[in-house]
């Protein structure tokens, strides 16, 4: 054999030996992957597997740990759940695929308990489908680390998988004793309340904790002690009633480390949001904005605030009021306040308090016993339309601190030479009524005890059975407990 052939034979031997060593390892690796594959299915595979029929089987066979049972029926892509379960201690887990809806009409009560490492829900919903509570009830008596309905990201083999599913409450009751009634995690998830009641009754329990989108068009959302709504994202209220009986915030959004103003917004164009505790806030958006075009937002307790927003408030309609002593209707720290319509009032406090630009182009801003506008050191005030009214003997006072004891002007502005002679522009009117003189009867057409800008823009008058002040072209401001006599 030639030397060249010997080299070729040796090379083939090397290849054969390497193959004999490597192939068993490759075979073992393929076997391991085959066995592991079912455990690392993608969310899409998981959703394709959980068809309406699979969901039906899961629900019908669910052992809640209590008494009674659930019954599910399928019609197309809709799974309807009825039945009655009490004393449940286990979680009902539902992975609902896109295009599939579960319509809940059953009664389920129970208690599931989590801890700070593992948040649990009586019902845990995942997937891109919809879970709707249409009637019946779902009640959880678990602790503060649990939810009645938990919706959001799930952990698959250490990997966080997010989805875009929906929770809808159109009827019935969803409630929590000490935990949270609805928790929805993930920016892509949505919660819609169009009827029914979502409530939290004990401890610091919250009715809704949301990180994505929340839309309320009707129904009741309430909390006995904690916030009715907490979290972040976009909240839109067009109807219904949101309240907290004794919590210091009814709606608390964007109140966490690392929050960004552009990510958090509360929009109110209908419905009612109220705070009922002294020092409470109806809407509190620490890092974000508030827009109001309708509805009622009110702080009923002494020292309460109807709207607090760190990064700006815009009002184009609706009613925002602080009804208690020392309250504030609107307070913004770092961005502008713009009012183009609506009613903003404080019974005996401050109607608008801002640290940046405050622009009034319409609407009515009033304080009966306090300040209509309280402007901070870096603030400018422009009244281009509407009415600004307060009890007092002067239009504007200039002071060196926000805690000035002087309460005798409609507008308070930090001392500034260039804004020393404050006047409105356009159709704007500012009125101060010196109620301290004690008069409660005036002659129509007179200006007794009234100071107005522009001069002559206000006089006493009647509008039907109401007495008050005529201002501008056709404006009329009602003042209770006075009488205007027409000669």
Image (cartoon, rainbow, N blue to C red):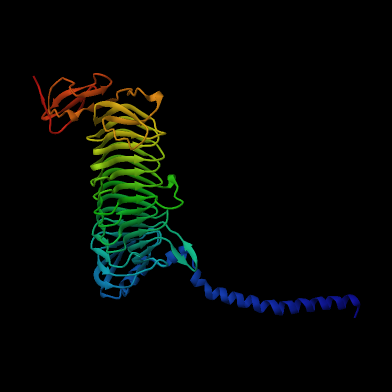
Place residue 291 in its image quadrant: top left
Q: Is residue 130 visible?
A: no
Rendered position, 311 above or below 484: below
Rendered position, 230 above or below 445: below
Left or right, residue 93 beside residue 459: right
Q: Quadrant location of the N terminus?
A: bottom right
State the residue at coordinates (38%, 68%): 115
The x, y position of residue 298, in whole percent, is 25, 44
Left or right, residue 288 beside residue 241: right
Q: Is residue 404 visible?
A: yes
State the residue at coordinates (17%, 31%): 479
The x, y position of residue 29, in whole percent, is 61, 75
The x, y position of residue 436, in whole percent, is 19, 30
Rendered position, 372 above or below 70: above
Left or right, residue 199 beside residue 419: left
State the residue at coordinates (40%, 45%): 288
């Amino acid at each position: 054999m030639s030397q060249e052939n010997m080299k070729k034979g040796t090379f083939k031997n090397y290849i054969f030996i390497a193959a004999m060593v490597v192939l068993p390892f490759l075979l073992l690796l393929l076997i391991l992957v085959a066995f592991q594959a079912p455990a690392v299915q993608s969310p899409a595979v998981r959703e394709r597997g959980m068809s309406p029929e699979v969901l039906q089987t899961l629900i019908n066979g669910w052992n809640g740990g209590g008494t009674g049972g659930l019954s599910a029926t399928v019609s197309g892509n809709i799974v309807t759940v009825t039945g009655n379960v009490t004393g449940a201690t286990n979680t009902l887990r539902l992975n609902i695929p896109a295009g599939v809806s579960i319509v809940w009409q059953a009664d389920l009560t129970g208690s599931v308990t989590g801890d700070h490492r593992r948040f649990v829900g009586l019902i845990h919903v995942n997937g891109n489908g919809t879970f709707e509570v249409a009637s019946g009830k779902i009640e959880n008596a678990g602790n503060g680390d649990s939810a009645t309905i938990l919706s959001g990201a799930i952990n698959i083999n250490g990997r966080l998988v997010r989805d875009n599913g929906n929770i809808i409450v159109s009827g019935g009751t969803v409630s929590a004793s000490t935990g949270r009634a609805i928790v929805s995690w993930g920016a892509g998830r949505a919660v819609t309340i169009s009827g029914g009641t979502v409530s939290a009754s004990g401890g610091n329990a919250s009715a809704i904790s949301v990180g994505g989108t929340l839309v309320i068009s009707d129904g009741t959302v309430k909390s006995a002690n904690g916030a009715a709504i907490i979290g972040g994202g976009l909240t839109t209220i067009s109807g219904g009633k949101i309240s907290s009986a004794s919590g210091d915030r009814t709606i608390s959004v964007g109140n966490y480390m690392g929050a960004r103003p552009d990510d958090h917004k509360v929009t109110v164009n209908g419905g009612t949001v109220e705070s009922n505790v002294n020092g409470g806030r109806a809407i509190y958006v620490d890092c974000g904005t508030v827009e109001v075009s309708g509805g009622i937002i009110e702080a009923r307790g002494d020292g309460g605030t109807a709207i607090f927003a760190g990064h700006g408030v815009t009002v184009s309609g609706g009613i925002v009021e602080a009804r208690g002593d020392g309250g504030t209707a609107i307070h913004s720290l770092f961005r502008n306040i713009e009012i183009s319509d609506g009613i903003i009032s404080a019974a005996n406090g401050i109607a608008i308090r801002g640290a940046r630009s405050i622009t009034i182009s319409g609407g009515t801003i009033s304080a009966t016993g306090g300040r209509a506008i309280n402007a901070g050191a870096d603030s400018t005030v422009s009244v281009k339309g509407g009415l600004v009214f307060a009890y007092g003997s002067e239009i504007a006072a200039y002071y060196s601190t926000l805690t000035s004891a002087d309460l005798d002007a409609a507008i308070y502005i930090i001392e500034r030479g260039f804004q020393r002679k404050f006047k409105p522009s356009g159709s704007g009117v500012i009125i101060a009524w010196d109620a301290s003189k004690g008069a409660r009867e005036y002659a129509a057409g007179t200006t007794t005890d009234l100071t107005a800008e522009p001069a002559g823009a206000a006089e006493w008058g009647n509008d039907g059975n109401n007495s008050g002040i005529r201002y501008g072209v056709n404006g009329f401001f009602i003042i209770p407990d006075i009488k205007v006599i027409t000669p």
